[in-house]
Amino acid sequence: MFNLTQLVRKNILSLRPYSSARSEFTGKEGIFLDANENPFGQYNRYPDPYQKKLKSRLGELKNIPSENIFIGNGSDEVIDLIFRIFCQPQVDKALTFSPTYGMYQVVADIHETPLTQIPLDENFQIDLEAFQQTIEKENFKLLLICSPNNPTGNILKGIDKVLEMFKGIVLIDEAYIDFSESSSWASKVQEYPNLIVSQTLSKAWGLAAARVGVAYTNPDIIALLNKVKPPYNVSQLNQEIALQTLANPQIFEEQKATILAQKKYLEKELNQLSIIQKIYPSDANFLLVETAEPTALYNRLIGQNIIIRNRSKLVENALRITVGTPEENQLLITQLKKISNEKSPIYR
Ligand SMILES: Cc1ncc(COP(=O)(O)O)c(C=O)c1O
């Protein structure tokens, strides 16, 4: 039997959360003399601490009840809160599959939680046997799964098996799921009481500057996230722009279609370049490519004012290229063709 209470840090279980002015009195009308705000101005009032309108709109779009939704200041905040709730510093342990999103290690380090990284196999898929052996040997409180995975770009298979095997808290980070044809795990949070699925408006929805991340999970874990979060973690401005953006899913669909078509264009063009040895399959809005001299190529592109991501410390010889606008992608390909056509050594 799953027992959430046993997984939560004791100090968080007994924590009496801060009771903010806007959570004590939730009415909209009245003379507000309760929160030490300046009575003048347009953005003078604290925002809704529970972002009810935003959750209701997201719930409509995703077909998930509001009570299963938590909004964070970016999904990075969600990751941080999960460590705070479940990982007792210097006691509990966390697990992930590598290579993966670098913030997991940083957040684990902040919370003094050792993070074991099980290498993905040669296709960047989960090695279920290695996973089984690892969880048999040690107890892990938290498992972080990034799917589609950053920086490899692929959807991870076998998550259903992992969920059957792992009894701690599982976070599936779906920052790039909107670009993928695979369905989200968010609809399964009622089925798995230990499952949290995070998504973000930073990628496909085009709102990286606004910092709006989402966690889908059961109401008991939502209550813990609410207990631990800063009272007004999502600003009024961020809530407004998120609502405006979510009111227009058509723009999102059009942009997404353009990005996916441009990804195909990039794949086709990159395939013809002698300096690119491999393009890894991608379910996201970026491509991981293999090249003989990644750092030299990265620096050459910087010299042309084109900035990609050097991921060669994570994956041998790898560079990560985000799909840009059609003009940006064309410029990138033009530069890469030039470099590719140079006599060797091509980078010097
Ligand atoms: C896998 C993954 N998760 C989370 C994030 C953070 O997203 P947010 O902007 O919602 O904090 C990123 C950003 O690059 C990411 O790649």
Image (spheres, helix red, strand yellow):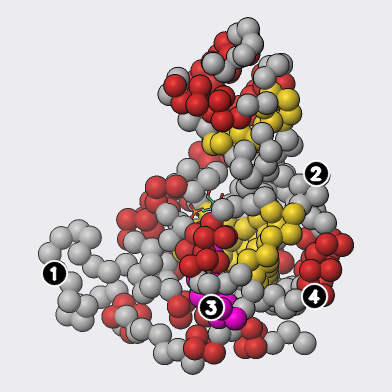
Question: Which is more toward the observer, 245 or 86?
Answer: 86
Measured in 3D between alpha carbons, the distance from the residue under mark 4 to the one under mark 2, in whole angstroms, is 25 Å
Mark earlier in primary sequence (3, 2): 3
Residue that mark 1 sits on: 39
Please identify the residue farthest to the bottom as the structure is shown: 14
Q: Which residue appears at 38% of the width and 73% of the height? A: 230
Mark earlier in primary sequence (1, 2): 1
Q: How many marks?
A: 4
* Residue 49 in the image, given as x and y percentages of width and height: 38, 72
Q: Amino acid at mark 2?
A: Asn
Residue that mark 4 sits on: 137
* SS at circle 3: loop
- Residue 73 versus residue 136 in the image, above or below: above
Mark earlier in primary sequence (1, 3): 1
Tag 1–tag 2 contact (CB < 8 Å): no
Q: Amino acid at mark 3?
A: Pro
Question: Which is more toward the observer, 170 or 253?
Answer: 170
* Residue 75 in the image, given as x and y percentages of width and height: 51, 59
Q: Which residue appears at 57% of the width and 24% of the height? A: 297
- Rendered-image quadrant of the N terminus: bottom right
* SS at circle 4: helix
Q: Which mark is residue 89?
A: 3
Mark earlier in primary sequence (1, 4): 1
- Residue 288 versus residue 44 in the image, above or below: above
Q: Range of the magenta residues?
A: 79-91
Residues packed near mark 3 inside 10 Å, few (<14), some (14 to 19) or many (20 plus): some
Measured in 3D between alpha carbons, the distance from the residue under mark 1 to the one under mark 4, in whole angstroms, is 59 Å
Q: Amino acid at mark 4?
A: Lys
Q: Which residue appears at 72% of the width and 66% of the height? A: 188
Residues packed near mark 1 inside 10 Å, few (<14), some (14 to 19) or many (20 plus): few
Question: Which is more toward the observer, 81 or 54?
Answer: 81
Mark earlier in primary sequence (4, 2): 2
